[in-house]
Image (cartoon, rainbow, N blue to C red):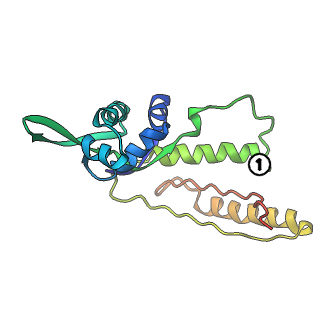
């Protein structure tokens, strides 16, 4: 079972995004038969099998083994991943972004979609995927906002200059700075 499955095909999203199938998929975090899942969900085995079959066709569930019960072969199924990640490209862009200004939310959305696609394309079977995630909250008074953004840009440009050579492992650095929703 993979840790994450990145879904880029509309057929996969359609198969997944049905409440009944999500419940079936949750039950298949561990290998189970359709009969076992049906019992847990208080459904008929036939109804569960219908959903499992659609999930298998979409590549979201796999038959991991089979057993014979009273002369009938019964499949044992398991989810293909422990979590599923929907690509923003499934919907695609509606209309054009009006600005490509680095300070616009549209630019930030484009950047996040690019990061998500890049991460989704990584080979998760690779023995090593060195990465770093940092998140925190910074409070900047309005009168210092531009200075903060300028300082941040300068610090990042320094890193790009220092490590931007043609040798070594390639890493992509994306930094997002956006207003936090007020919860007060």
Quarter of the view holding residue 24? top left
Q: Is residue 62 above or below residue 96?
A: below
Query: Left or right: 42 with respect to 111?
Result: left
Q: Position of residue 63 (x, y in %)?
A: 24, 40
Quarter of the view holding residue 127? bottom left
Name the foreground residue: 80 vs 25: 25
Quarter of the view holding residue 73? top left
Which residue lies most toward the right here? Answer: 143
Name the foreground residue: 72 vs 88: 72
Mark 1: give few (<14), some (14-19) or many (20+) Cα within 10 Å: few
Look at the numbered disc 1 and give the secondary structure of its residue: loop
Q: Position of residue 136 (x, y in %)?
A: 66, 69
Which residue lies most toward the left here? Answer: 71
State the residue at coordinates (63%, 48%): 112
State the residue at coordinates (79%, 44%): 101
Q: Dot 1 corresponds to which residue?
A: 102
Q: Is residue 36 above or below residue 54?
A: below
Q: Position of residue 159 (x, y in %)?
A: 64, 63
């Amino acid at each position: 079972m993979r840790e994450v499955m990145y879904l880029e095909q509309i057929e996969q999203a359609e198969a997944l995004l049905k409440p009944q199938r999500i419940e079936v998929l949750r039950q298949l975090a561990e290998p189970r038969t359709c009969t076992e899942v049906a019992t847990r969900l208080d459904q008929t085995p036939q109804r569960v099998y219908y959903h499992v079959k659609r999930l298998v066709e979409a590549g979201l569930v796999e038959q991991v083994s089979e057993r014979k019960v009273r002369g009938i072969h019964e499949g044992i199924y398991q989810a293909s991943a422990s979590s599923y990640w929907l690509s923003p490209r499934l919907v695609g862009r509606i209309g054009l972004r009006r600005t490509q200004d680095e300070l616009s939310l549209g630019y930030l959305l484009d950047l996040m979609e690019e990061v998500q696609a890049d991460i989704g394309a990584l080979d998760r079977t690779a023995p090593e995927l060195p990465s770093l995630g940092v998140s925190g909250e910074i409070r900047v008074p309005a009168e210092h906002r531009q200075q903060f953004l300028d300082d941040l840009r300068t610090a990042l440009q320094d890193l790009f200059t220092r490590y931007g050579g043609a040798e070594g492992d390639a890493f992509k650095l994306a930094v997002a700075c956006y207003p936090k929703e007020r919860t007060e």
